[in-house]
Image: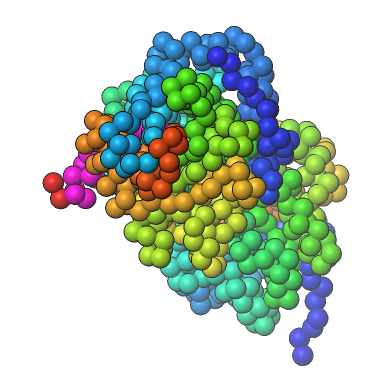
């Protein structure tokens, strides 16, 4: 018999508490369902789970991913060609839970496919599949009331974003409506590996930290090496690595797993 | 002539036209949109800004553009009298310059030296390149590689005007993908860059701003048609891609209850073929959704992926439609129909041969609707067609389609 685990917002909160006790940030890889194939994407996520990552951002492919750079654009395009729908993504989460993957899983998808699926139905089905929360990059808080209310009712985390351009008023607003964590975009731009972290990152993070109270901050966009991960691990509550893992996965599951393992090692 | 703003109840403060509109963009862009709204409101309240735009329109764009009475075409159809608002005679050959000059002046006022724009038919790209050259701004235009191939002359014009044209190879390689790429550029360079959006779509305040800058079309036309025909038109007809020339024409007539407002979408190979860009006509693909920052009608698969569209005219070949059109349709103030590729081609030839005017393929869709309607109407009825652009850019496409 499988042990019943806490899921949803509580699971996300527990993840940050555990990382904090270990005096490091939570490492949450991004990986899209359907790349290189649906079956392989599930294998890759299961393999990443074995390396000791703390949580996942599970990508739902969309035809017009305007916040993504070339690597994720290409991978999610392949995923669509492989027949990856919202339903397939939720089913993948269910399979991963059945295989014993316990880390929190955040569903990350652009809004239109979720509207087509049905906002409330999506939250209910994501919860039933074993997902813990939701990230929608083209939905700022003003447009997110229905999702936020449904997630609150169902005990799911509803993440919103902050960016280097965010004013103090935006920071206060997002801190008020986000649950689970705030996704802090490290730079002005789209997803994709960068050789350097942005020079103004520390100042930006200080500005946000002073204004959001206890809400965990998760840094994403551009983090691509174990060294960078180690640097940001000391500054935030969590971080997301996406493009570089997706790129590694094009050389096979082992390459992605090895990179994740090196990042896990670096932040220990 | 000053442009009036905030004369309607839409959009509301959140950028909504009833159920449509909003600001569905990554958080990074929200401050840029806030800054844009503030700068736009301030500029429009400043007589100096408005006078500068009006002066440029008078001395550079060639405004007011005339209305031509299409005597031979009307005669041939034997019904309503057809009048053409000649946006094809505006500098650069289409209505797009009205908006491009307005936004470029705003960019300059905001201290943004770098312009990014998307283009489908190339007319908005040419207008943006032109306005940027005039004001000394750097201009980068994203254009799908499929559109570059079918609108070659406009690609060359943009380059001559000093703009950089960046081919877009992702997705369907048409307007939708060019907008994606322009938004990605804007997100990346948001502090220094002004996104000069070419139609009445995108996140608030773009649909409102583009409408206001294009409203000069209807404001002039309303005055002109009363002077020429002695009355208001029975109907205004305009093609609808994103919807800028149509909203520009419709806006001045919105309170004239007797004037029917008719938008014409691209019917492509026919609605039943599903190879079209008629967001309103085909409920199997056109449903409420979110694309490029606004909630509106979006052509999509059952799974919510954006559907491929088809039109012989690059400027109408787009999967969504400006939110104000969705609102005008829902409130039944405007009516939307479609014309097929074939009907547009045929209308283009009719207009060329009866009036000596070769319209853009986009505009030919509006002409096609006038050709359908006029014979069913009495002789004292008046149809006002927005001739949004000239056809020079389409000669290659038309020659191929007609096997000339
Ligand atoms: C001549 C002309 N008419 C119409 C359009 C369609 O755009 P909109 O619906 O914004 O007027 C275009 C777009 O490129 C165009 O070039």
Estimate the x, y position of residue A149 in percent, counting from the top left. 81, 58
Of residues B172 and B79, the one nearer the viewer is B79
Estimate the x, y position of residue A41 in percent, counting from the top left. 53, 71
Residue furthest to the left in view is B404
Give the image's coloring scheme.
rainbow
| Quarter containing the N terminus of chain B | top right
Q: Give the quadrant of residue B82.
A: top left
**Relative height, residue A205 to residue B65 (above, below):** below
Q: Is residue B39 left or right of residue B402?
A: right
Q: Which residues are magenta?
A: B385-402
| Residue B271 visible from this viewpoint | yes
Of residues A75 and B388, the one nearer the viewer is B388
Q: Say which residue appears at 77% left-offset and 53% top-offset.
A: A145
Q: Is residue B394 left or right of residue B331?
A: left
Of residues A64 and B290, the one nearer the viewer is B290
Q: Say which residue appears at 39% left-offset and 34% top-offset.
A: B81
| Residue B24 visible from this viewpoint | no
Asked if residue B272 is among those painted magenta in the image, a careful observer would answer no
Q: Is residue B10 left or right of residue B315?
A: right
Q: Is residue A18 left or right of residue A255?
A: right
Residue furthest to the bottom in view is A1
**Relative height, residue B92 to residue A214 (above, below):** above
Estimate the x, y position of residue B173 in percent, counting from the top left. 37, 50
Asked if residue B399 is among those painted magenta in the image, a careful observer would answer yes
Looking at the image, how many numbered discs can be counted on the residues? 0
Q: Say which residue appears at 37% left-offset and 46% top-offset.
A: B375
Q: Say which residue appears at 51% left-offset and 27% top-offset.
A: B231
Estimate the x, y position of residue B227 in percent, counting from the top left. 47, 19
């Amino acid at each position: 018999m499988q042990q019943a685990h806490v899921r949803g917002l509580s699971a996300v909160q527990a993840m940050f508490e555990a990382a904090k006790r270990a005096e490091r940030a939570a490492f949450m890889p991004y990986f899209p369902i359907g790349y290189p194939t649906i079956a392989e994407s599930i294998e890759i996520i299961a393999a990443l789970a074995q390396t000791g990552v703390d949580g996942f951002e599970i990508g739902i492919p969309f035809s017009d991913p305007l916040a993504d750079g070339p690597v994720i654009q290409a991978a999610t395009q392949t995923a669509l060609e492989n027949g990856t729908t919202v339903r397939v993504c939720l089913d993948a989460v269910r399979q991963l839970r059945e295989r014993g993957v316990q880390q929190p899983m955040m569903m990350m998808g652009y809004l239109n496919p979720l509207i087509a699926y049905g906002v409330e139905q999506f939250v209910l089905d994501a919860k039933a599949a074993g997902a813990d929360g939701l990230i929608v990059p083209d939905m700022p808080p003003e447009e997110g009331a229905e999702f936020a209310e449904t997630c609150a009712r169902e005990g799911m985390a509803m993440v919103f974003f902050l960016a280097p351009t965010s004013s103090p008023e935006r920071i206060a607003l997002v801190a008020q409506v986000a649950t689970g964590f705030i996704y802090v975009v490290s730079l002005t731009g789209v997803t994709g590996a960068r050789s350097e972290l942005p020079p103004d990152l520390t100042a930006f993070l200080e500005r946000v930290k002073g204004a959001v109270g206890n809400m965990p901050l998760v840094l994403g966009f551009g983090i691509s090496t174990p060294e960078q991960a180690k640097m940001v691990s000391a500054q935030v509550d969590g971080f997301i690595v996406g493009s570089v893992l997706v790129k590694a996965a094009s050389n096979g599951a082992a390459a992605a797993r090895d990179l994740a393992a090196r990042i896990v090692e670096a932040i220990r | 002539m000053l442009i009036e703003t905030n004369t309607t109840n839409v959009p509301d403060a959140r950028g909504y036209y009833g159920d449509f509109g909003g600001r569905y963009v990554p958080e990074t862009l929200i401050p840029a949109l806030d800054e844009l709204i503030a700068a736009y409101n301030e500029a429009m309240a400043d007589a100096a800004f408005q006078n500068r735009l009006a002066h440029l329109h008078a001395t550079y764009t060639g405004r007011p553009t005339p209305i031509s009475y299409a005597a031979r075409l009307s005669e041939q159809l034997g019904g309503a009298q057809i009048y053409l608002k000649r946006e094809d005679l505006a500098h650069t050959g289409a209505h797009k310059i009205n908006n491009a000059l307005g936004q470029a002046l705003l960019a300059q006022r905001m201290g943004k030296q770098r312009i990014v724009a998307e283009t489908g038919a190339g007319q908005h790209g040419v207008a943006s390149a032109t306005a940027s050259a005039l004001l000394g701004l750097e201009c980068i235009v994203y254009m799908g590689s499929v559109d570059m191939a079918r609108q070659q002359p406009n690609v060359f014009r943009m380059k001559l005007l000093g703009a950089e044209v960046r081919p877009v190879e992702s997705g369907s390689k048409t307007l939708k993908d060019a907008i994606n790429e322009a938004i990605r550029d804007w997100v990346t360079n948001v502090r220094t860059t002004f996104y000069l959006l070419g139609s009445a779509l995108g996140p608030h305040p773009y649909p409102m701003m583009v409408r206001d800058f294009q409203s000069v079309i209807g404001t002039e036309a309303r005055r002109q048609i009363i002077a020429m025909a002695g009355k208001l038109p029975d109907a205004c007809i305009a093609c609808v891609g994103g919807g800028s020339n149509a909203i520009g024409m419709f806006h001045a007539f919105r309170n004239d209850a007797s004037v029917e407002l008719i938008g014409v979408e691209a019917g492509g190979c026919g609605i039943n073929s599903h190879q079209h860009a008629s967001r309103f006509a085909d409920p199997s693909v056109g449903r409420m959704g979110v694309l490029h920052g606004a909630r509106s009608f979006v052509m999509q698969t059952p799974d919510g992926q954006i559907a491929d569209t088809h039109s012989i005219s690059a400027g109408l070949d787009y999967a969504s439609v400006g939110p104000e059109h969705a609102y005008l349709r829902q409130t039944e103030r405007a009516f939307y129909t479609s014309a097929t590729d074939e009907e547009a081609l045929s209308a283009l030839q009719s207009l060329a041969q009866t009036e000596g005017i070769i319209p853009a393929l986009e505009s030919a869709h509006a002409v096609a609707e006038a050709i359908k309607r006029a014979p069913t109407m009495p002789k004292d009825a008046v149809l006002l067609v927005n001739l949004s652009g000239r056809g020079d850019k389409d000669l290659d496409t038309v020659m191929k389609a007609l096997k000339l």
